[in-house]
Image (cartoon, grey):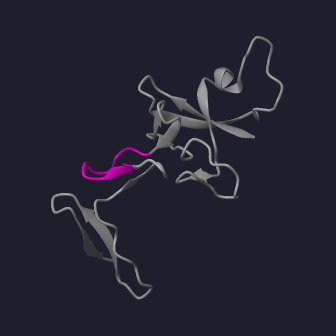
Amino acid sequence: MAHYAILDENNIVLRVVVGRDETDELPEGVESWEEYYGGKRCSYNTFGNTHSTGGKPFRGNYPAPGFIYDEEWDAFYAPQPYPSWKMNYDKFTWEAPIPMPPIKPEDTFIWRWSEPNKEWIKVNL
C-alpha cells in the first residue's frame, strides 16, 4: 500500500489518498502510479526526513492537507508557522530562532512562541 498526495496548482496538499504500491503492475497506457493518481507519492513512515522504521526517508515528511510540496527539494513540509522561523533543510522542519526550553514532568505550563517578542513564553495549563 502506498500513499499519494494530491496537490493544487500551487503545490499545496489538498488530501492524501491510499493507492497501489509502486511495484504493482500499471494499467495499460499509464507510466507511473503518480500519473494514475495525479499526485506525488509520499511515505507514511517519514517525518523530519527520518524513516520511523529505519528505512530510507522519502520526500522529507508525510504530508497533511495544507503542506507544501517543494519541487526543487522534492520534499513535503508544513507551512511556515511564524515569519522568524527558518527552514531546516536537513529535516524539512521549521525551527524557531531560539530553541524551546526543556519541559520537566512536574511543569504545570507549556511553552508558546511569541512572535512579537521573538521568545518562548510560559502558558499555564
105 relative position to 30: left or right:
left
Decide whether residue 120 is among the magenta residues: no
Give the dominant element type of the magenta stretch: helix, strand or loop: loop
Residue 79 position within the rendered picture, expressed as x and y whole percent measured from the top left: 38, 44
Residue at the farthest front position: 90
- How many marks on residues? 0
* In the image, farthest residue toward the bottom: 106
Q: Quadrant of the C terminus?
A: bottom left
70 vs 87, left or right, is right
* Residue 82 included in the magenta stretch of the image: yes
Magenta residues (range): 78-87
Q: Compared with residue 38, is residue 48 higher up or lower down, i.e. above or below?
A: below
Up-down: is 108 above or below 36?
below
Q: Residue at x 54, y 47 (%)?
A: 61
Which residue sits furthest top? Answer: 29
Kindly identify the residue that appears in the image at 71 percent across and 39 percent down: 2
Quadrant containing the N terminus is top right
Which residue appears at 58% of the width and 38% of the height? 16
**Measured from the top left, where is residue 6 in percent x and y?**
55, 30
